[in-house]
Each structure stands twice: as structure tokens, then as C-alpha cells.
Amino acid sequence: MSVVVLTNDDGVHAPGLAALEKALAELGDVYVVAPEREQSACGHALTLHRPLRALQMGEHRFAVNGTPSDCVNMAVLGFLPETPVLVVSGINHGANLGDDVTYSGTVAAAMEGTILGVPSIAVSLLDGGDFEIAGRVARLVAMRVLVGGLPGNTLLNVNVPVQPPRGIRMTRLGHRVYKEKIVEQADPRGRSHYWIGGGEARWDDLEGTDMGAVHDGYVSLTPLHLDLTNHRALVQLNDWQGGLNAQFLSETGRWPRRGRAPAATPKRKPRRG
Ligand code: MN
């Protein structure tokens, strides 16, 4: 049977992960490789400066002292007996919508799977929603991906509303309006400390967006890709190249000249980061 990998960013003990495991149990040879503790809002971080260890917690269950992306990286690149055919990340405790996807460890785990060439899905449930229902949605989407695959370099970001869903909508990412302020407090010794990320999220223009769908009681399915290039801006800024080059060439004549070539630097392994 094909290997399917499950991970999350709420940690290996999270009820959302258990619900996902239960819902997808029959879809393949299912392995859980998940962070040993909560890693929410860790984004796409990889652990490159200390070793990773995997604590076996069951026949097909491992807790890793790293991030969700570490877990997927390990699972896809040799930790498991076979390369997985599917990565599913979640079920996250809370939404991952719009601009917030860039902070999300749940979504980043699916990004990591996608970068490594494995079809990947991120599943999140809005606070107060039902994990069993979200599990059924995850199963439906996962089966569809297993049968039909996904377009190249594309992951699916799934958000399940609080109430039992009225249906499924294909959506684009929405935009959050940031009106919140940092919260400054004093500790018992009178020193200031700060909290960020508080306050209620506000969203603009819900039409066609992920936020709009969950707001209307639908499951939101957003295809995401990792190309952050703003292609419209690339066209709009087309004349920058000529103008900047003219300036560059007129200025380089005045730049200090290097005496001689710098000493060869020792060869290093390329690395991310
Ligand atoms: Mn989380």
C-alpha cells in the first residue's frame, strides 16, 4: 500500500491530528511524523543548526523535535520505508486563511511536501468546529487528490467552517486588514513587555475568497503555489530595468576599484536559510 504522511503544527498529541489519522486510516500505509510540541505560527522554518531526533510512539507514529517542515522533509527524503504519495497536514486548531497562510506551520508543511514533489494538502478547522466533520472533508479531498493528482507545484489549503458545511467552494486567498496594535504591559518588576498578534481579524472584500466561503458556511479549497512573483507588477515595472541600468552604468565609473581578486573562499555545501 502507498505511504501517506500526516503531520501538523499543533504537536503530535493534538486532537486535530488524531482526528485526521482516524479519518484517513484506510487511504494507505499511514504514518504520522509530527512535531513533539506545538509549533503554530512557525512558518516554513527548517532546523539546520542542531540534529533532529524521532521518538517512536507507535508502530507508525513518530514525534520529532523540530518543525512541521522538518517532519515532512524527513518523511519524504528517506526516513520512511518508501517515498510517500501524499502529505496531509492538520487538522489545524484554528483557521489558516488569506495573508495568514504565510505564518502557518500547517500550510508550510504542505509547501514542503510540494517543493519535494509530493502532492500535499493543508487542513484547518475554524475554532469551535467539529474535528470529525473536518476529518470527513479531509478524506474526501485526499481521495480526490490521490485519484486525480494536483496541478504542478500546487498545494491545496482547506479550511472547514464552524458549523456543518453547506458545501465546498473553490476560492482565492483573502486579505486581512491589520488594525490591531501591540499590547504593552509591565512585569512585576516594572519592566515593559509586548504582545503581538492580538485583536480580532478583519477582512476586506469577501467575494470569491477563502474567508468569504467559511463566513458563508462553506468549506474553502484554495490552490496555492510557491511563486510569490507579482507577475502584473513585473510588467508594470518593466521600464525600471532600462532606467536603473543607465544609472548603474553611469555610477559604476565612480565606484572604488578592487585591487585584486579576493582570495578563493573554501567550498561550502549549499544550504537553505
Ligand atoms: Mn496550529
Image: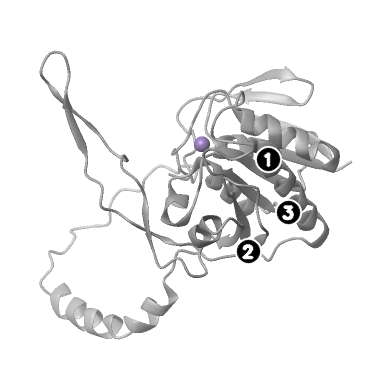
The residue at which mark 2 appears reads as 169
Mark 1 secondary-structure assignment: helix
Residue at the far top: name it.
Answer: 189
Give the residue type that dot 2 points to: Arg
Give the residue type that dot 3 points to: Val
> Gap between marks 2 and 3, in whole Å?
12 Å
> Gap between marks 2 and 1, in whole Å?
33 Å
Of residues 205 and 257, the one drawn nearer to the viewer in this rendering = 205
* Residue 40 horizontal/vertical position (percent): 47, 35
The residue at which mark 1 appears reads as 77
The residue at which mark 3 appears reads as 141
Name the quarter where the C terminus is drawn. Answer: top left
Mark 2 secondary-structure assignment: strand
Of residues 223 and 272, the one drawn nearer to the viewer in this rendering = 223
Q: Nearer the viewer, mark 2 or mark 1?
A: 2
Q: Tell me, yes or no, whether the two marked residues, 2 and 3, touch with CB atoms within 8 Å.
A: no
Q: Nearer the viewer, mark 3 or mark 1?
A: 3
Q: Is residue 175 left or right of residue 166?
A: left
Whichever of labels 3 and 1 marks the residue nearer the N terminus, that label is: 1
* Label 1 packing within 10 angstroms: few (<14), some (14-19), many (20+): few
Q: Is residue 264 left or right of residue 86?
A: left
Of residues 62 and 188, the one drawn nearer to the viewer in this rendering = 188
